């Protein structure tokens, strides 16, 4: 019987790149979270649409960067510790009716607001397109935060007026990045997971000018988003032209032995148990504060878990690592004499694959399977199979474990889901 | 720039095969290589018994809700020990809910054979199945069970999963094919790993705590802080009856409208949770042979003075749930299959850091979470206590009030005569199905 695992000559051309993010629009070379840097920002609240991954258009209200198009979520702000920032807010929302909007910044202290009209939580920008409300604050603590409209937030956050804030620690070095001052927060790659939901009925009623019928107490979501997209759009490239109002993606990638920082934001109104397949993650901070017993101790109160419960309004910073250690077989398919890979678990070097895999006709193959159980190795799967694994990496589904949330308006799969790719050593990750 | 590699793996594979060659077409074929490495990895002093081989089937079946409603399910069932040629017949319509609980020891190697026996009631379905060991550390994609990322097994064939068990704690396992559907339909199970600290020599010192043979711990705590007398796995899940009926009646499945109405512990709604015996389903209502498909009781029994370890996990597909216990102090000692301890002050040594365990009266879990809680009955009067959900609307079996996510903890008075022997006790209520070797 021919063994299922066969040697394969590595591919010479990159294929199917359209599904993976290789481009990043960011100020930092090598940074993986798209966003705006600086100290002075202008947001314009506008009406627009987003695409559910089932193809449906959902009417939204979103924050645009300056005169650009509204986006969902709003622009991610990448700020620096102790550097004051100013955000000017204008409002052009006139459909279905003029509505005021505002900005609140959970976790930030001493936010001042000037201009516009008084509102319940803060000053609001009337929908005249010219009045500017100016918010200023100084982020004094590094970490992961978010912002959202403070005007009728039960409706306006649902409609899309929400976004992320990342505060870099003083002395942040992009070549050796940390989320906080302490070395316990060091990472090699960072990714944003801004989690939201949408009730399609609310968006329909608003779109058709039936605001009086909107009842947010009967909220029943059927769309779930990471960074403003439903799966599988989460895994498309950032900034693709056919999702003009959903510029951000969620395509985490790493190499064995590296540290991946997950910045999880509960930006909606439901709690979500976020489950990264592949290993536990170590929660090092919540709500922008390291889990530390005394200042300077580092994350000595960190909790390791395989499912991270994201609750509304809370942010979590977690470090995910994967080495393939102690699996009992050589994940690269080495012969005992072969050279080691970087960060390889050497006690398993050269150990044979421990079972016989079934024949091709007995298996259903995943589109992200390389054809081989070994990292960096392609295998034969028959015509038409696979195709989404450009580098023979290991794919792991990262998703909300309330499985109902992996659905796009009654269509499975979708929703609050993406994949982590553990790429073989040497594969470039921007 | 891609790296080009050429590997020869044929020879490696052939050396692994200890029994007959792989089948050429669809066939049930379980693998169980002998342990010939000459190393005792599970700490029991014997070097050729570290392999655990289990065989489960994946298919469909029926269970009864707490109000009696017959409900169509997908699920796993234990076919360990059944000859390969008989597995299809044994597994068809044998789905259990929850599926079989797997208990393994740190240091063992688990060969889990999964045979897809098809859906007898839905011959139009050709779903493959997988096993996802939820929380397995450093999992490799090939054995992680996510169908899009690797492989899943078609009807009539067997896929053998391999796990080198190194991390003690409480986990879950479930099918990940069309996860929202297969999990809602009931392909959910429990798995937990006993720590190697259980195997220490009698009299060993654990930083001031003296270990004796028979003492059991939830983790390698190094100080006896997770020691317990009786342990119970408790799994939270819930069913949407309309989803299951739609599956039975070949209708489109209501994913968007999924609303769970039968909250359960270990696959049953109260008062079935406290029935110590396996429950026979009423599939004879449909002209089918009735089967024991709910084999796991949630009745907790202990003697005053016992420490009860609750290995709580949730595989709910829709909601978070909070469990609470009236009258018995509870301390959460583990989460996500890790002890609640801070980092080792010296680095990565065997010593565990600051004690992060906490006393509480409530434990909240979303789908995919697991927590270990120890109930201390030393100051508790004998009697019947309740473990139930604080989501009080979930104390129901659909419209039948009251029932649902509740069970009983029965504490009996300690026996007046001889003191507890040094070997300790390991209570296992009748009817709980455990797979072990």
Image (tube, coloured by chain):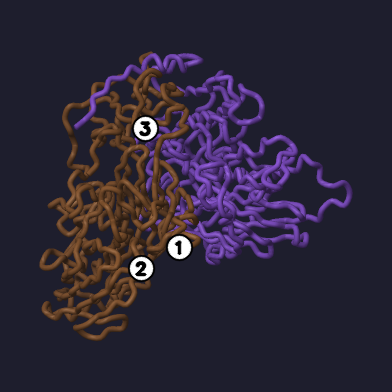
Chain colours: A brown, B purple
Please, what secondary structure does the residue beneath circle 1 have? loop
**How far across and down, in percent of the image, does residue B342 sit?**
53, 52
Q: CA distance from mark 2 to mark 1?
A: 41 Å
Dot placed on the residue nearer the N-terminal end, 2 or 1? 2
Q: CA distance from mark 3 to mark 1?
A: 47 Å
* Mark 2 touches mark 1? (CB < 8 Å): no
Residue in view at x 44 percent, y 34 percent: A325
Quadrant in which the N terminus of chain A is drawn: top left
Residue neighbourhood size for the residue with mark 2, other residues' Cα within 10 Å, grouped as few (<14), some (14–19), many (≥20): some
Residue in view at x 72 percent, y 57 percent: B377
Q: Chain of mark 2?
A: A
Q: Chain of mark 3?
A: B
User: Which one is in front in this view, the residue at disc 3 or the one at disc 1?
Assistant: 1
Name the residue nearer the viewer: B107 or A272.
B107
Q: Chain of mark 1?
A: A
The answer to whether A136 appears left or right of B172 in the picture is: left
Residue in view at x 64 percent, y 59 percent: B330
Residue at the disc numbered 1: A295
Residue at the disc numbered 3: B151
**How far across and down, in percent of the image, does residue A361 sit?**
34, 24
Please, what secondary structure does the residue beneath circle 3 have? strand
Q: Which mark is residue A219?
A: 2
Please, what secondary structure does the residue beneath circle 2 have? loop
Residue neighbourhood size for the residue with mark 3, other residues' Cα within 10 Å, grouped as few (<14), some (14–19), many (≥20): many
Residue neighbourhood size for the residue with mark 1, other residues' Cα within 10 Å, grouped as few (<14), some (14–19), many (≥20): few
Residue in view at x 35 percent, y 68 percent: A219
| Whether residue A104 can be seen here | yes
Name the residue nearer the viewer: B338 or A58.
B338
Q: CA distance from mark 3 to mark 2?
A: 38 Å
Name the residue nearer the viewer: B250 or A127.
A127
Marks 2 & 1 on one chain = yes
Quadrant in which the C terminus of chain A is drawn: top left
């Amino acid at each position: 019987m021919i063994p299922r695992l066969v040697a394969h000559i590595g591919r010479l051309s990159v294929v199917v790149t359209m599904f993976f993010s290789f481009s990043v629009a960011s100020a930092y070379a090598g940074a993986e979270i798209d966003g705006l840097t600086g100290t002075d920002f202008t947001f314009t609240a506008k009406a627009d649409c987003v695409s559910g991954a089932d193809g449906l258009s959902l009417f939204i209200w979103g924050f645009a960067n300056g005169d650009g198009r509204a986006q969902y979520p709003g622009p991610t702000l990448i700020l620096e510790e102790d550097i004051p920032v100013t955000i000017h807010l204008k409002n052009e929302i006139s459909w279905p009716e003029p509505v005021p909007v505002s900005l609140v910044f959970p976790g930030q202290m001493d936010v001042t607001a000037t201009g516009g009209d008084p509102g319940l939580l803060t000053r609001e920008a009337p929908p005249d397109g010219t009045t500017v409300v100016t918010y200023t604050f100084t982020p004094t603590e590094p970490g992961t935060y978010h912002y959202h409209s403070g005007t009728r937030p039960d409706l306006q956050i649902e409609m899309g007026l929400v976004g992320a804030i990342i505060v870099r620690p003083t002395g942040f070095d992009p070549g050796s990045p940390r989320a906080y001052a302490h070395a316990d927060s060091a990472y090699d790659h960072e990714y944003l997971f801004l989690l939201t939901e949408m009730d399609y009925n609310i968006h329909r009623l608003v779109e058709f000018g039936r605001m009086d019928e909107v009842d947010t107490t009967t909220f029943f979501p059927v769309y779930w988003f990471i960074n403003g997209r439903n799966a599988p759009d989460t895994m498309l490239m950032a900034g693709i032209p056919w999702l003009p109002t959903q510029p951000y993606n969620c395509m985490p990638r790493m190499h064995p032995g590296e540290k991946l920082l997950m910045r999880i934001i509960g930006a909606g109104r439901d709690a979500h148990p976020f489950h990264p397949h592949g290993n536990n993650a170590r929660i090092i901070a919540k709500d922008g504060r390291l889990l530390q017993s005394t200042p300077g101790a580092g994350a000595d109160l960190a909790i390791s878990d395989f499912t991270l419960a994201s609750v509304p309004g809370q942010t979590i910073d977690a470090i995910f690592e994967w080495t393939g250690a102690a699996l009992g077989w050589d994940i690269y398919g080495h012969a005992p004499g072969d050279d080691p890979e970087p960060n390889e678990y050497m006690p398993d070097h050269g150990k044979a694959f421990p079972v016989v895999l079934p024949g091709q006709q007995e298996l259903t193959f995943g589109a992200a399977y390389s054809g081989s159980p070994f990292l960096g190795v392609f295998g034969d799967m028959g015509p038409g199979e696979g195709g989404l694994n450009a580098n023979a990496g290991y794919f792991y589904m990262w998703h909300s474990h309330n499985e109902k949330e992996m659905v796009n308006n009654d269509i499975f799969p979708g929703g609050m889901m993406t994949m982590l790719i553990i790429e073989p050593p040497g594969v470039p990750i921007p | 720039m891609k790296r080009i590699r050429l590997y020869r793996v044929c020879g490696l594979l052939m050396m692994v095969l200890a029994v007959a060659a792989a089948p050429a077409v669809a066939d049930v074929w379980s693998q169980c290589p002998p342990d010939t490495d000459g190393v005792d990895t599970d700490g029991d002093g014997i070097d050729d018994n570290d392999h655990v081989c289990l065989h489960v089937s994946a298919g469909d079946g029926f269970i009864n809700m707490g109000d009696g409603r017959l409900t169509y399910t997908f699920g796993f069932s234990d076919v360990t020990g059944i000859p390969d040629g008989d597995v299809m017949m044994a597994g068809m319509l044998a789905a259990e809910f929850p599926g079989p609980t797997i208990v393994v020891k740190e240091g063992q190697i688990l060969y889990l054979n999964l045979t897809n026996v098809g859906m007898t009631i839905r011959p139009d379905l050709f779903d493959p199945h997988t096993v996802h060991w939820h929380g397995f550390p450093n999992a490799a994609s090939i054995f992680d069970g996510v169908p899009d990322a690797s492989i899943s097994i078609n009807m009539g064939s067997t896929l053998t999963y391999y796990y080198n068990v190194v991390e003690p704690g409480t986990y879950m396992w479930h099918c990940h094919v069309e996860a929202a559907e297969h999990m809602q339909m009931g392909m959910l199970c429990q798995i937990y790993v006993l720590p190697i600290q259980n195997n220490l020599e009698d009299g060993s010192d654990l930083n001031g705590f003296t270990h004796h043979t028979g003492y059991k711990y939830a983790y390698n705590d190094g100080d006896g802080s997770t020691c317990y007398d009786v342990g119970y796995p408790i799994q939270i899940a819930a069913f949407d009856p309309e989803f299951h009926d739609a599956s039975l009646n070949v209708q489109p499945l209501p994913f968007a409208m999924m609303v769970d109405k039968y909250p359960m512990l270990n696959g049953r709604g109260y008062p079935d949770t406290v029935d110590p015996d396996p429950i026979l389903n009423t599939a004879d209502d449909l002209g089918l042979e009735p089967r024991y498909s709910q084999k796991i009781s949630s009745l907790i029994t202990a003697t005053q003075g016992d420490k009860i370890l609750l290995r709580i996990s949730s595989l709910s597909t829709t909601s978070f749930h909070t469990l609470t216990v009236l009258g018995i102090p509870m301390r959460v000692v583990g989460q996500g299959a890790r002890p609640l301890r801070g980092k080792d002050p010296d680095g990565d040594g065997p010593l565990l850091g600051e004690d992060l365990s906490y006393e509480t009266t409530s434990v909240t879990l979303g789908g995919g979470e697991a927590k270990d809680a120890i109930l201390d009955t030393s100051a508790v009067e004998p009697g019947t206590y309740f473990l139930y959900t604080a989501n009080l609307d979930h104390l129901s079996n659909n419209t039948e009030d009251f029932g649902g996510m509740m069970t009983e903890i029965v504490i009996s008075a300690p026996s007046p005569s001889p003191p507890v022997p040094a070997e300790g006790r390991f209570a296992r209520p009748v009817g709980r199905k455990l797979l072990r070797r």
